[in-house]
Image (cartoon, rainbow, N blue to C red):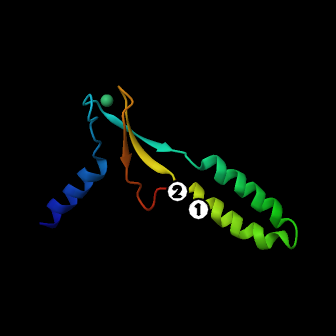
Amino acid sequence: MFKIDAEKASISTKEVPNCGLCGSVMKKSKEAKSGGMGCLLLIIGVLLCLTLYGAIIGIPLIIYALHLGSKRRGLWVCTKCGHQVERKIKWNEWG
Ligand SMILES: [Zn+2]
């Protein structure tokens, strides 16, 4: 019983969906929507931390920037027609 469950789990993690439009194989992709914004805030945060009082604003800014950077959406993109489907990002997958 346990063996069957383990096999099922290993299959589901490797499973790659097929495109809903053309049926072709889809590949993993990521949408870097707020990546640039997060990066900019991170730089500002680090610069603020260099000054004594700036760190008060700088540290929360860095945390917010990292939060923005990790909030990217996962996507499945069709290798043939480019059709995109939202993908659930695993908790251990960064960004
Ligand atoms: Zn397709």
User: Depth check: 54 or 13 in front?
Assistant: 54
Residue on which the image places disc 1 = 67
Residue 32 sits above or below residue 57 on the image: above
Asked if residue 64 lies left or right of residue 91, the reply is right
Picture disc at residue 86: none
Q: Quadrant of ligand 1?
A: top left
User: Depth check: 91 or 72 in front?
Assistant: 72
Classed neighbour count for the residue bearing mark 1: other residues with Cα under 10 Å, few (<14), some (14–19), many (≥20): few
Quadrant housing residue 43: bottom right
| Residue at disc 2, secondary structure | loop
Position of the N terminus, as image quadrant, is: bottom left
- Amino acid at pointer 2: Lys
- Amino acid at pointer 1: His
Asked if residue 65 lies left or right of residue 58, the reply is left
| Residue at disc 1, secondary structure | helix
User: Depth check: 90 or 68 in front?
Assistant: 68
Residue found at x 30% / y 33%? 25
Question: Any atom of ligand 1 within 8 Å of the CB at mark 2?
Answer: no
Classed neighbour count for the residue bearing mark 2: other residues with Cα under 10 Å, few (<14), some (14–19), many (≥20): some
3D distance between C-alphas at marks 2 and 1? 6 Å
Residue on which the image places disc 2 = 71
Q: Are marks 2 and 1 in contact (CB under 8 Å)?
A: yes
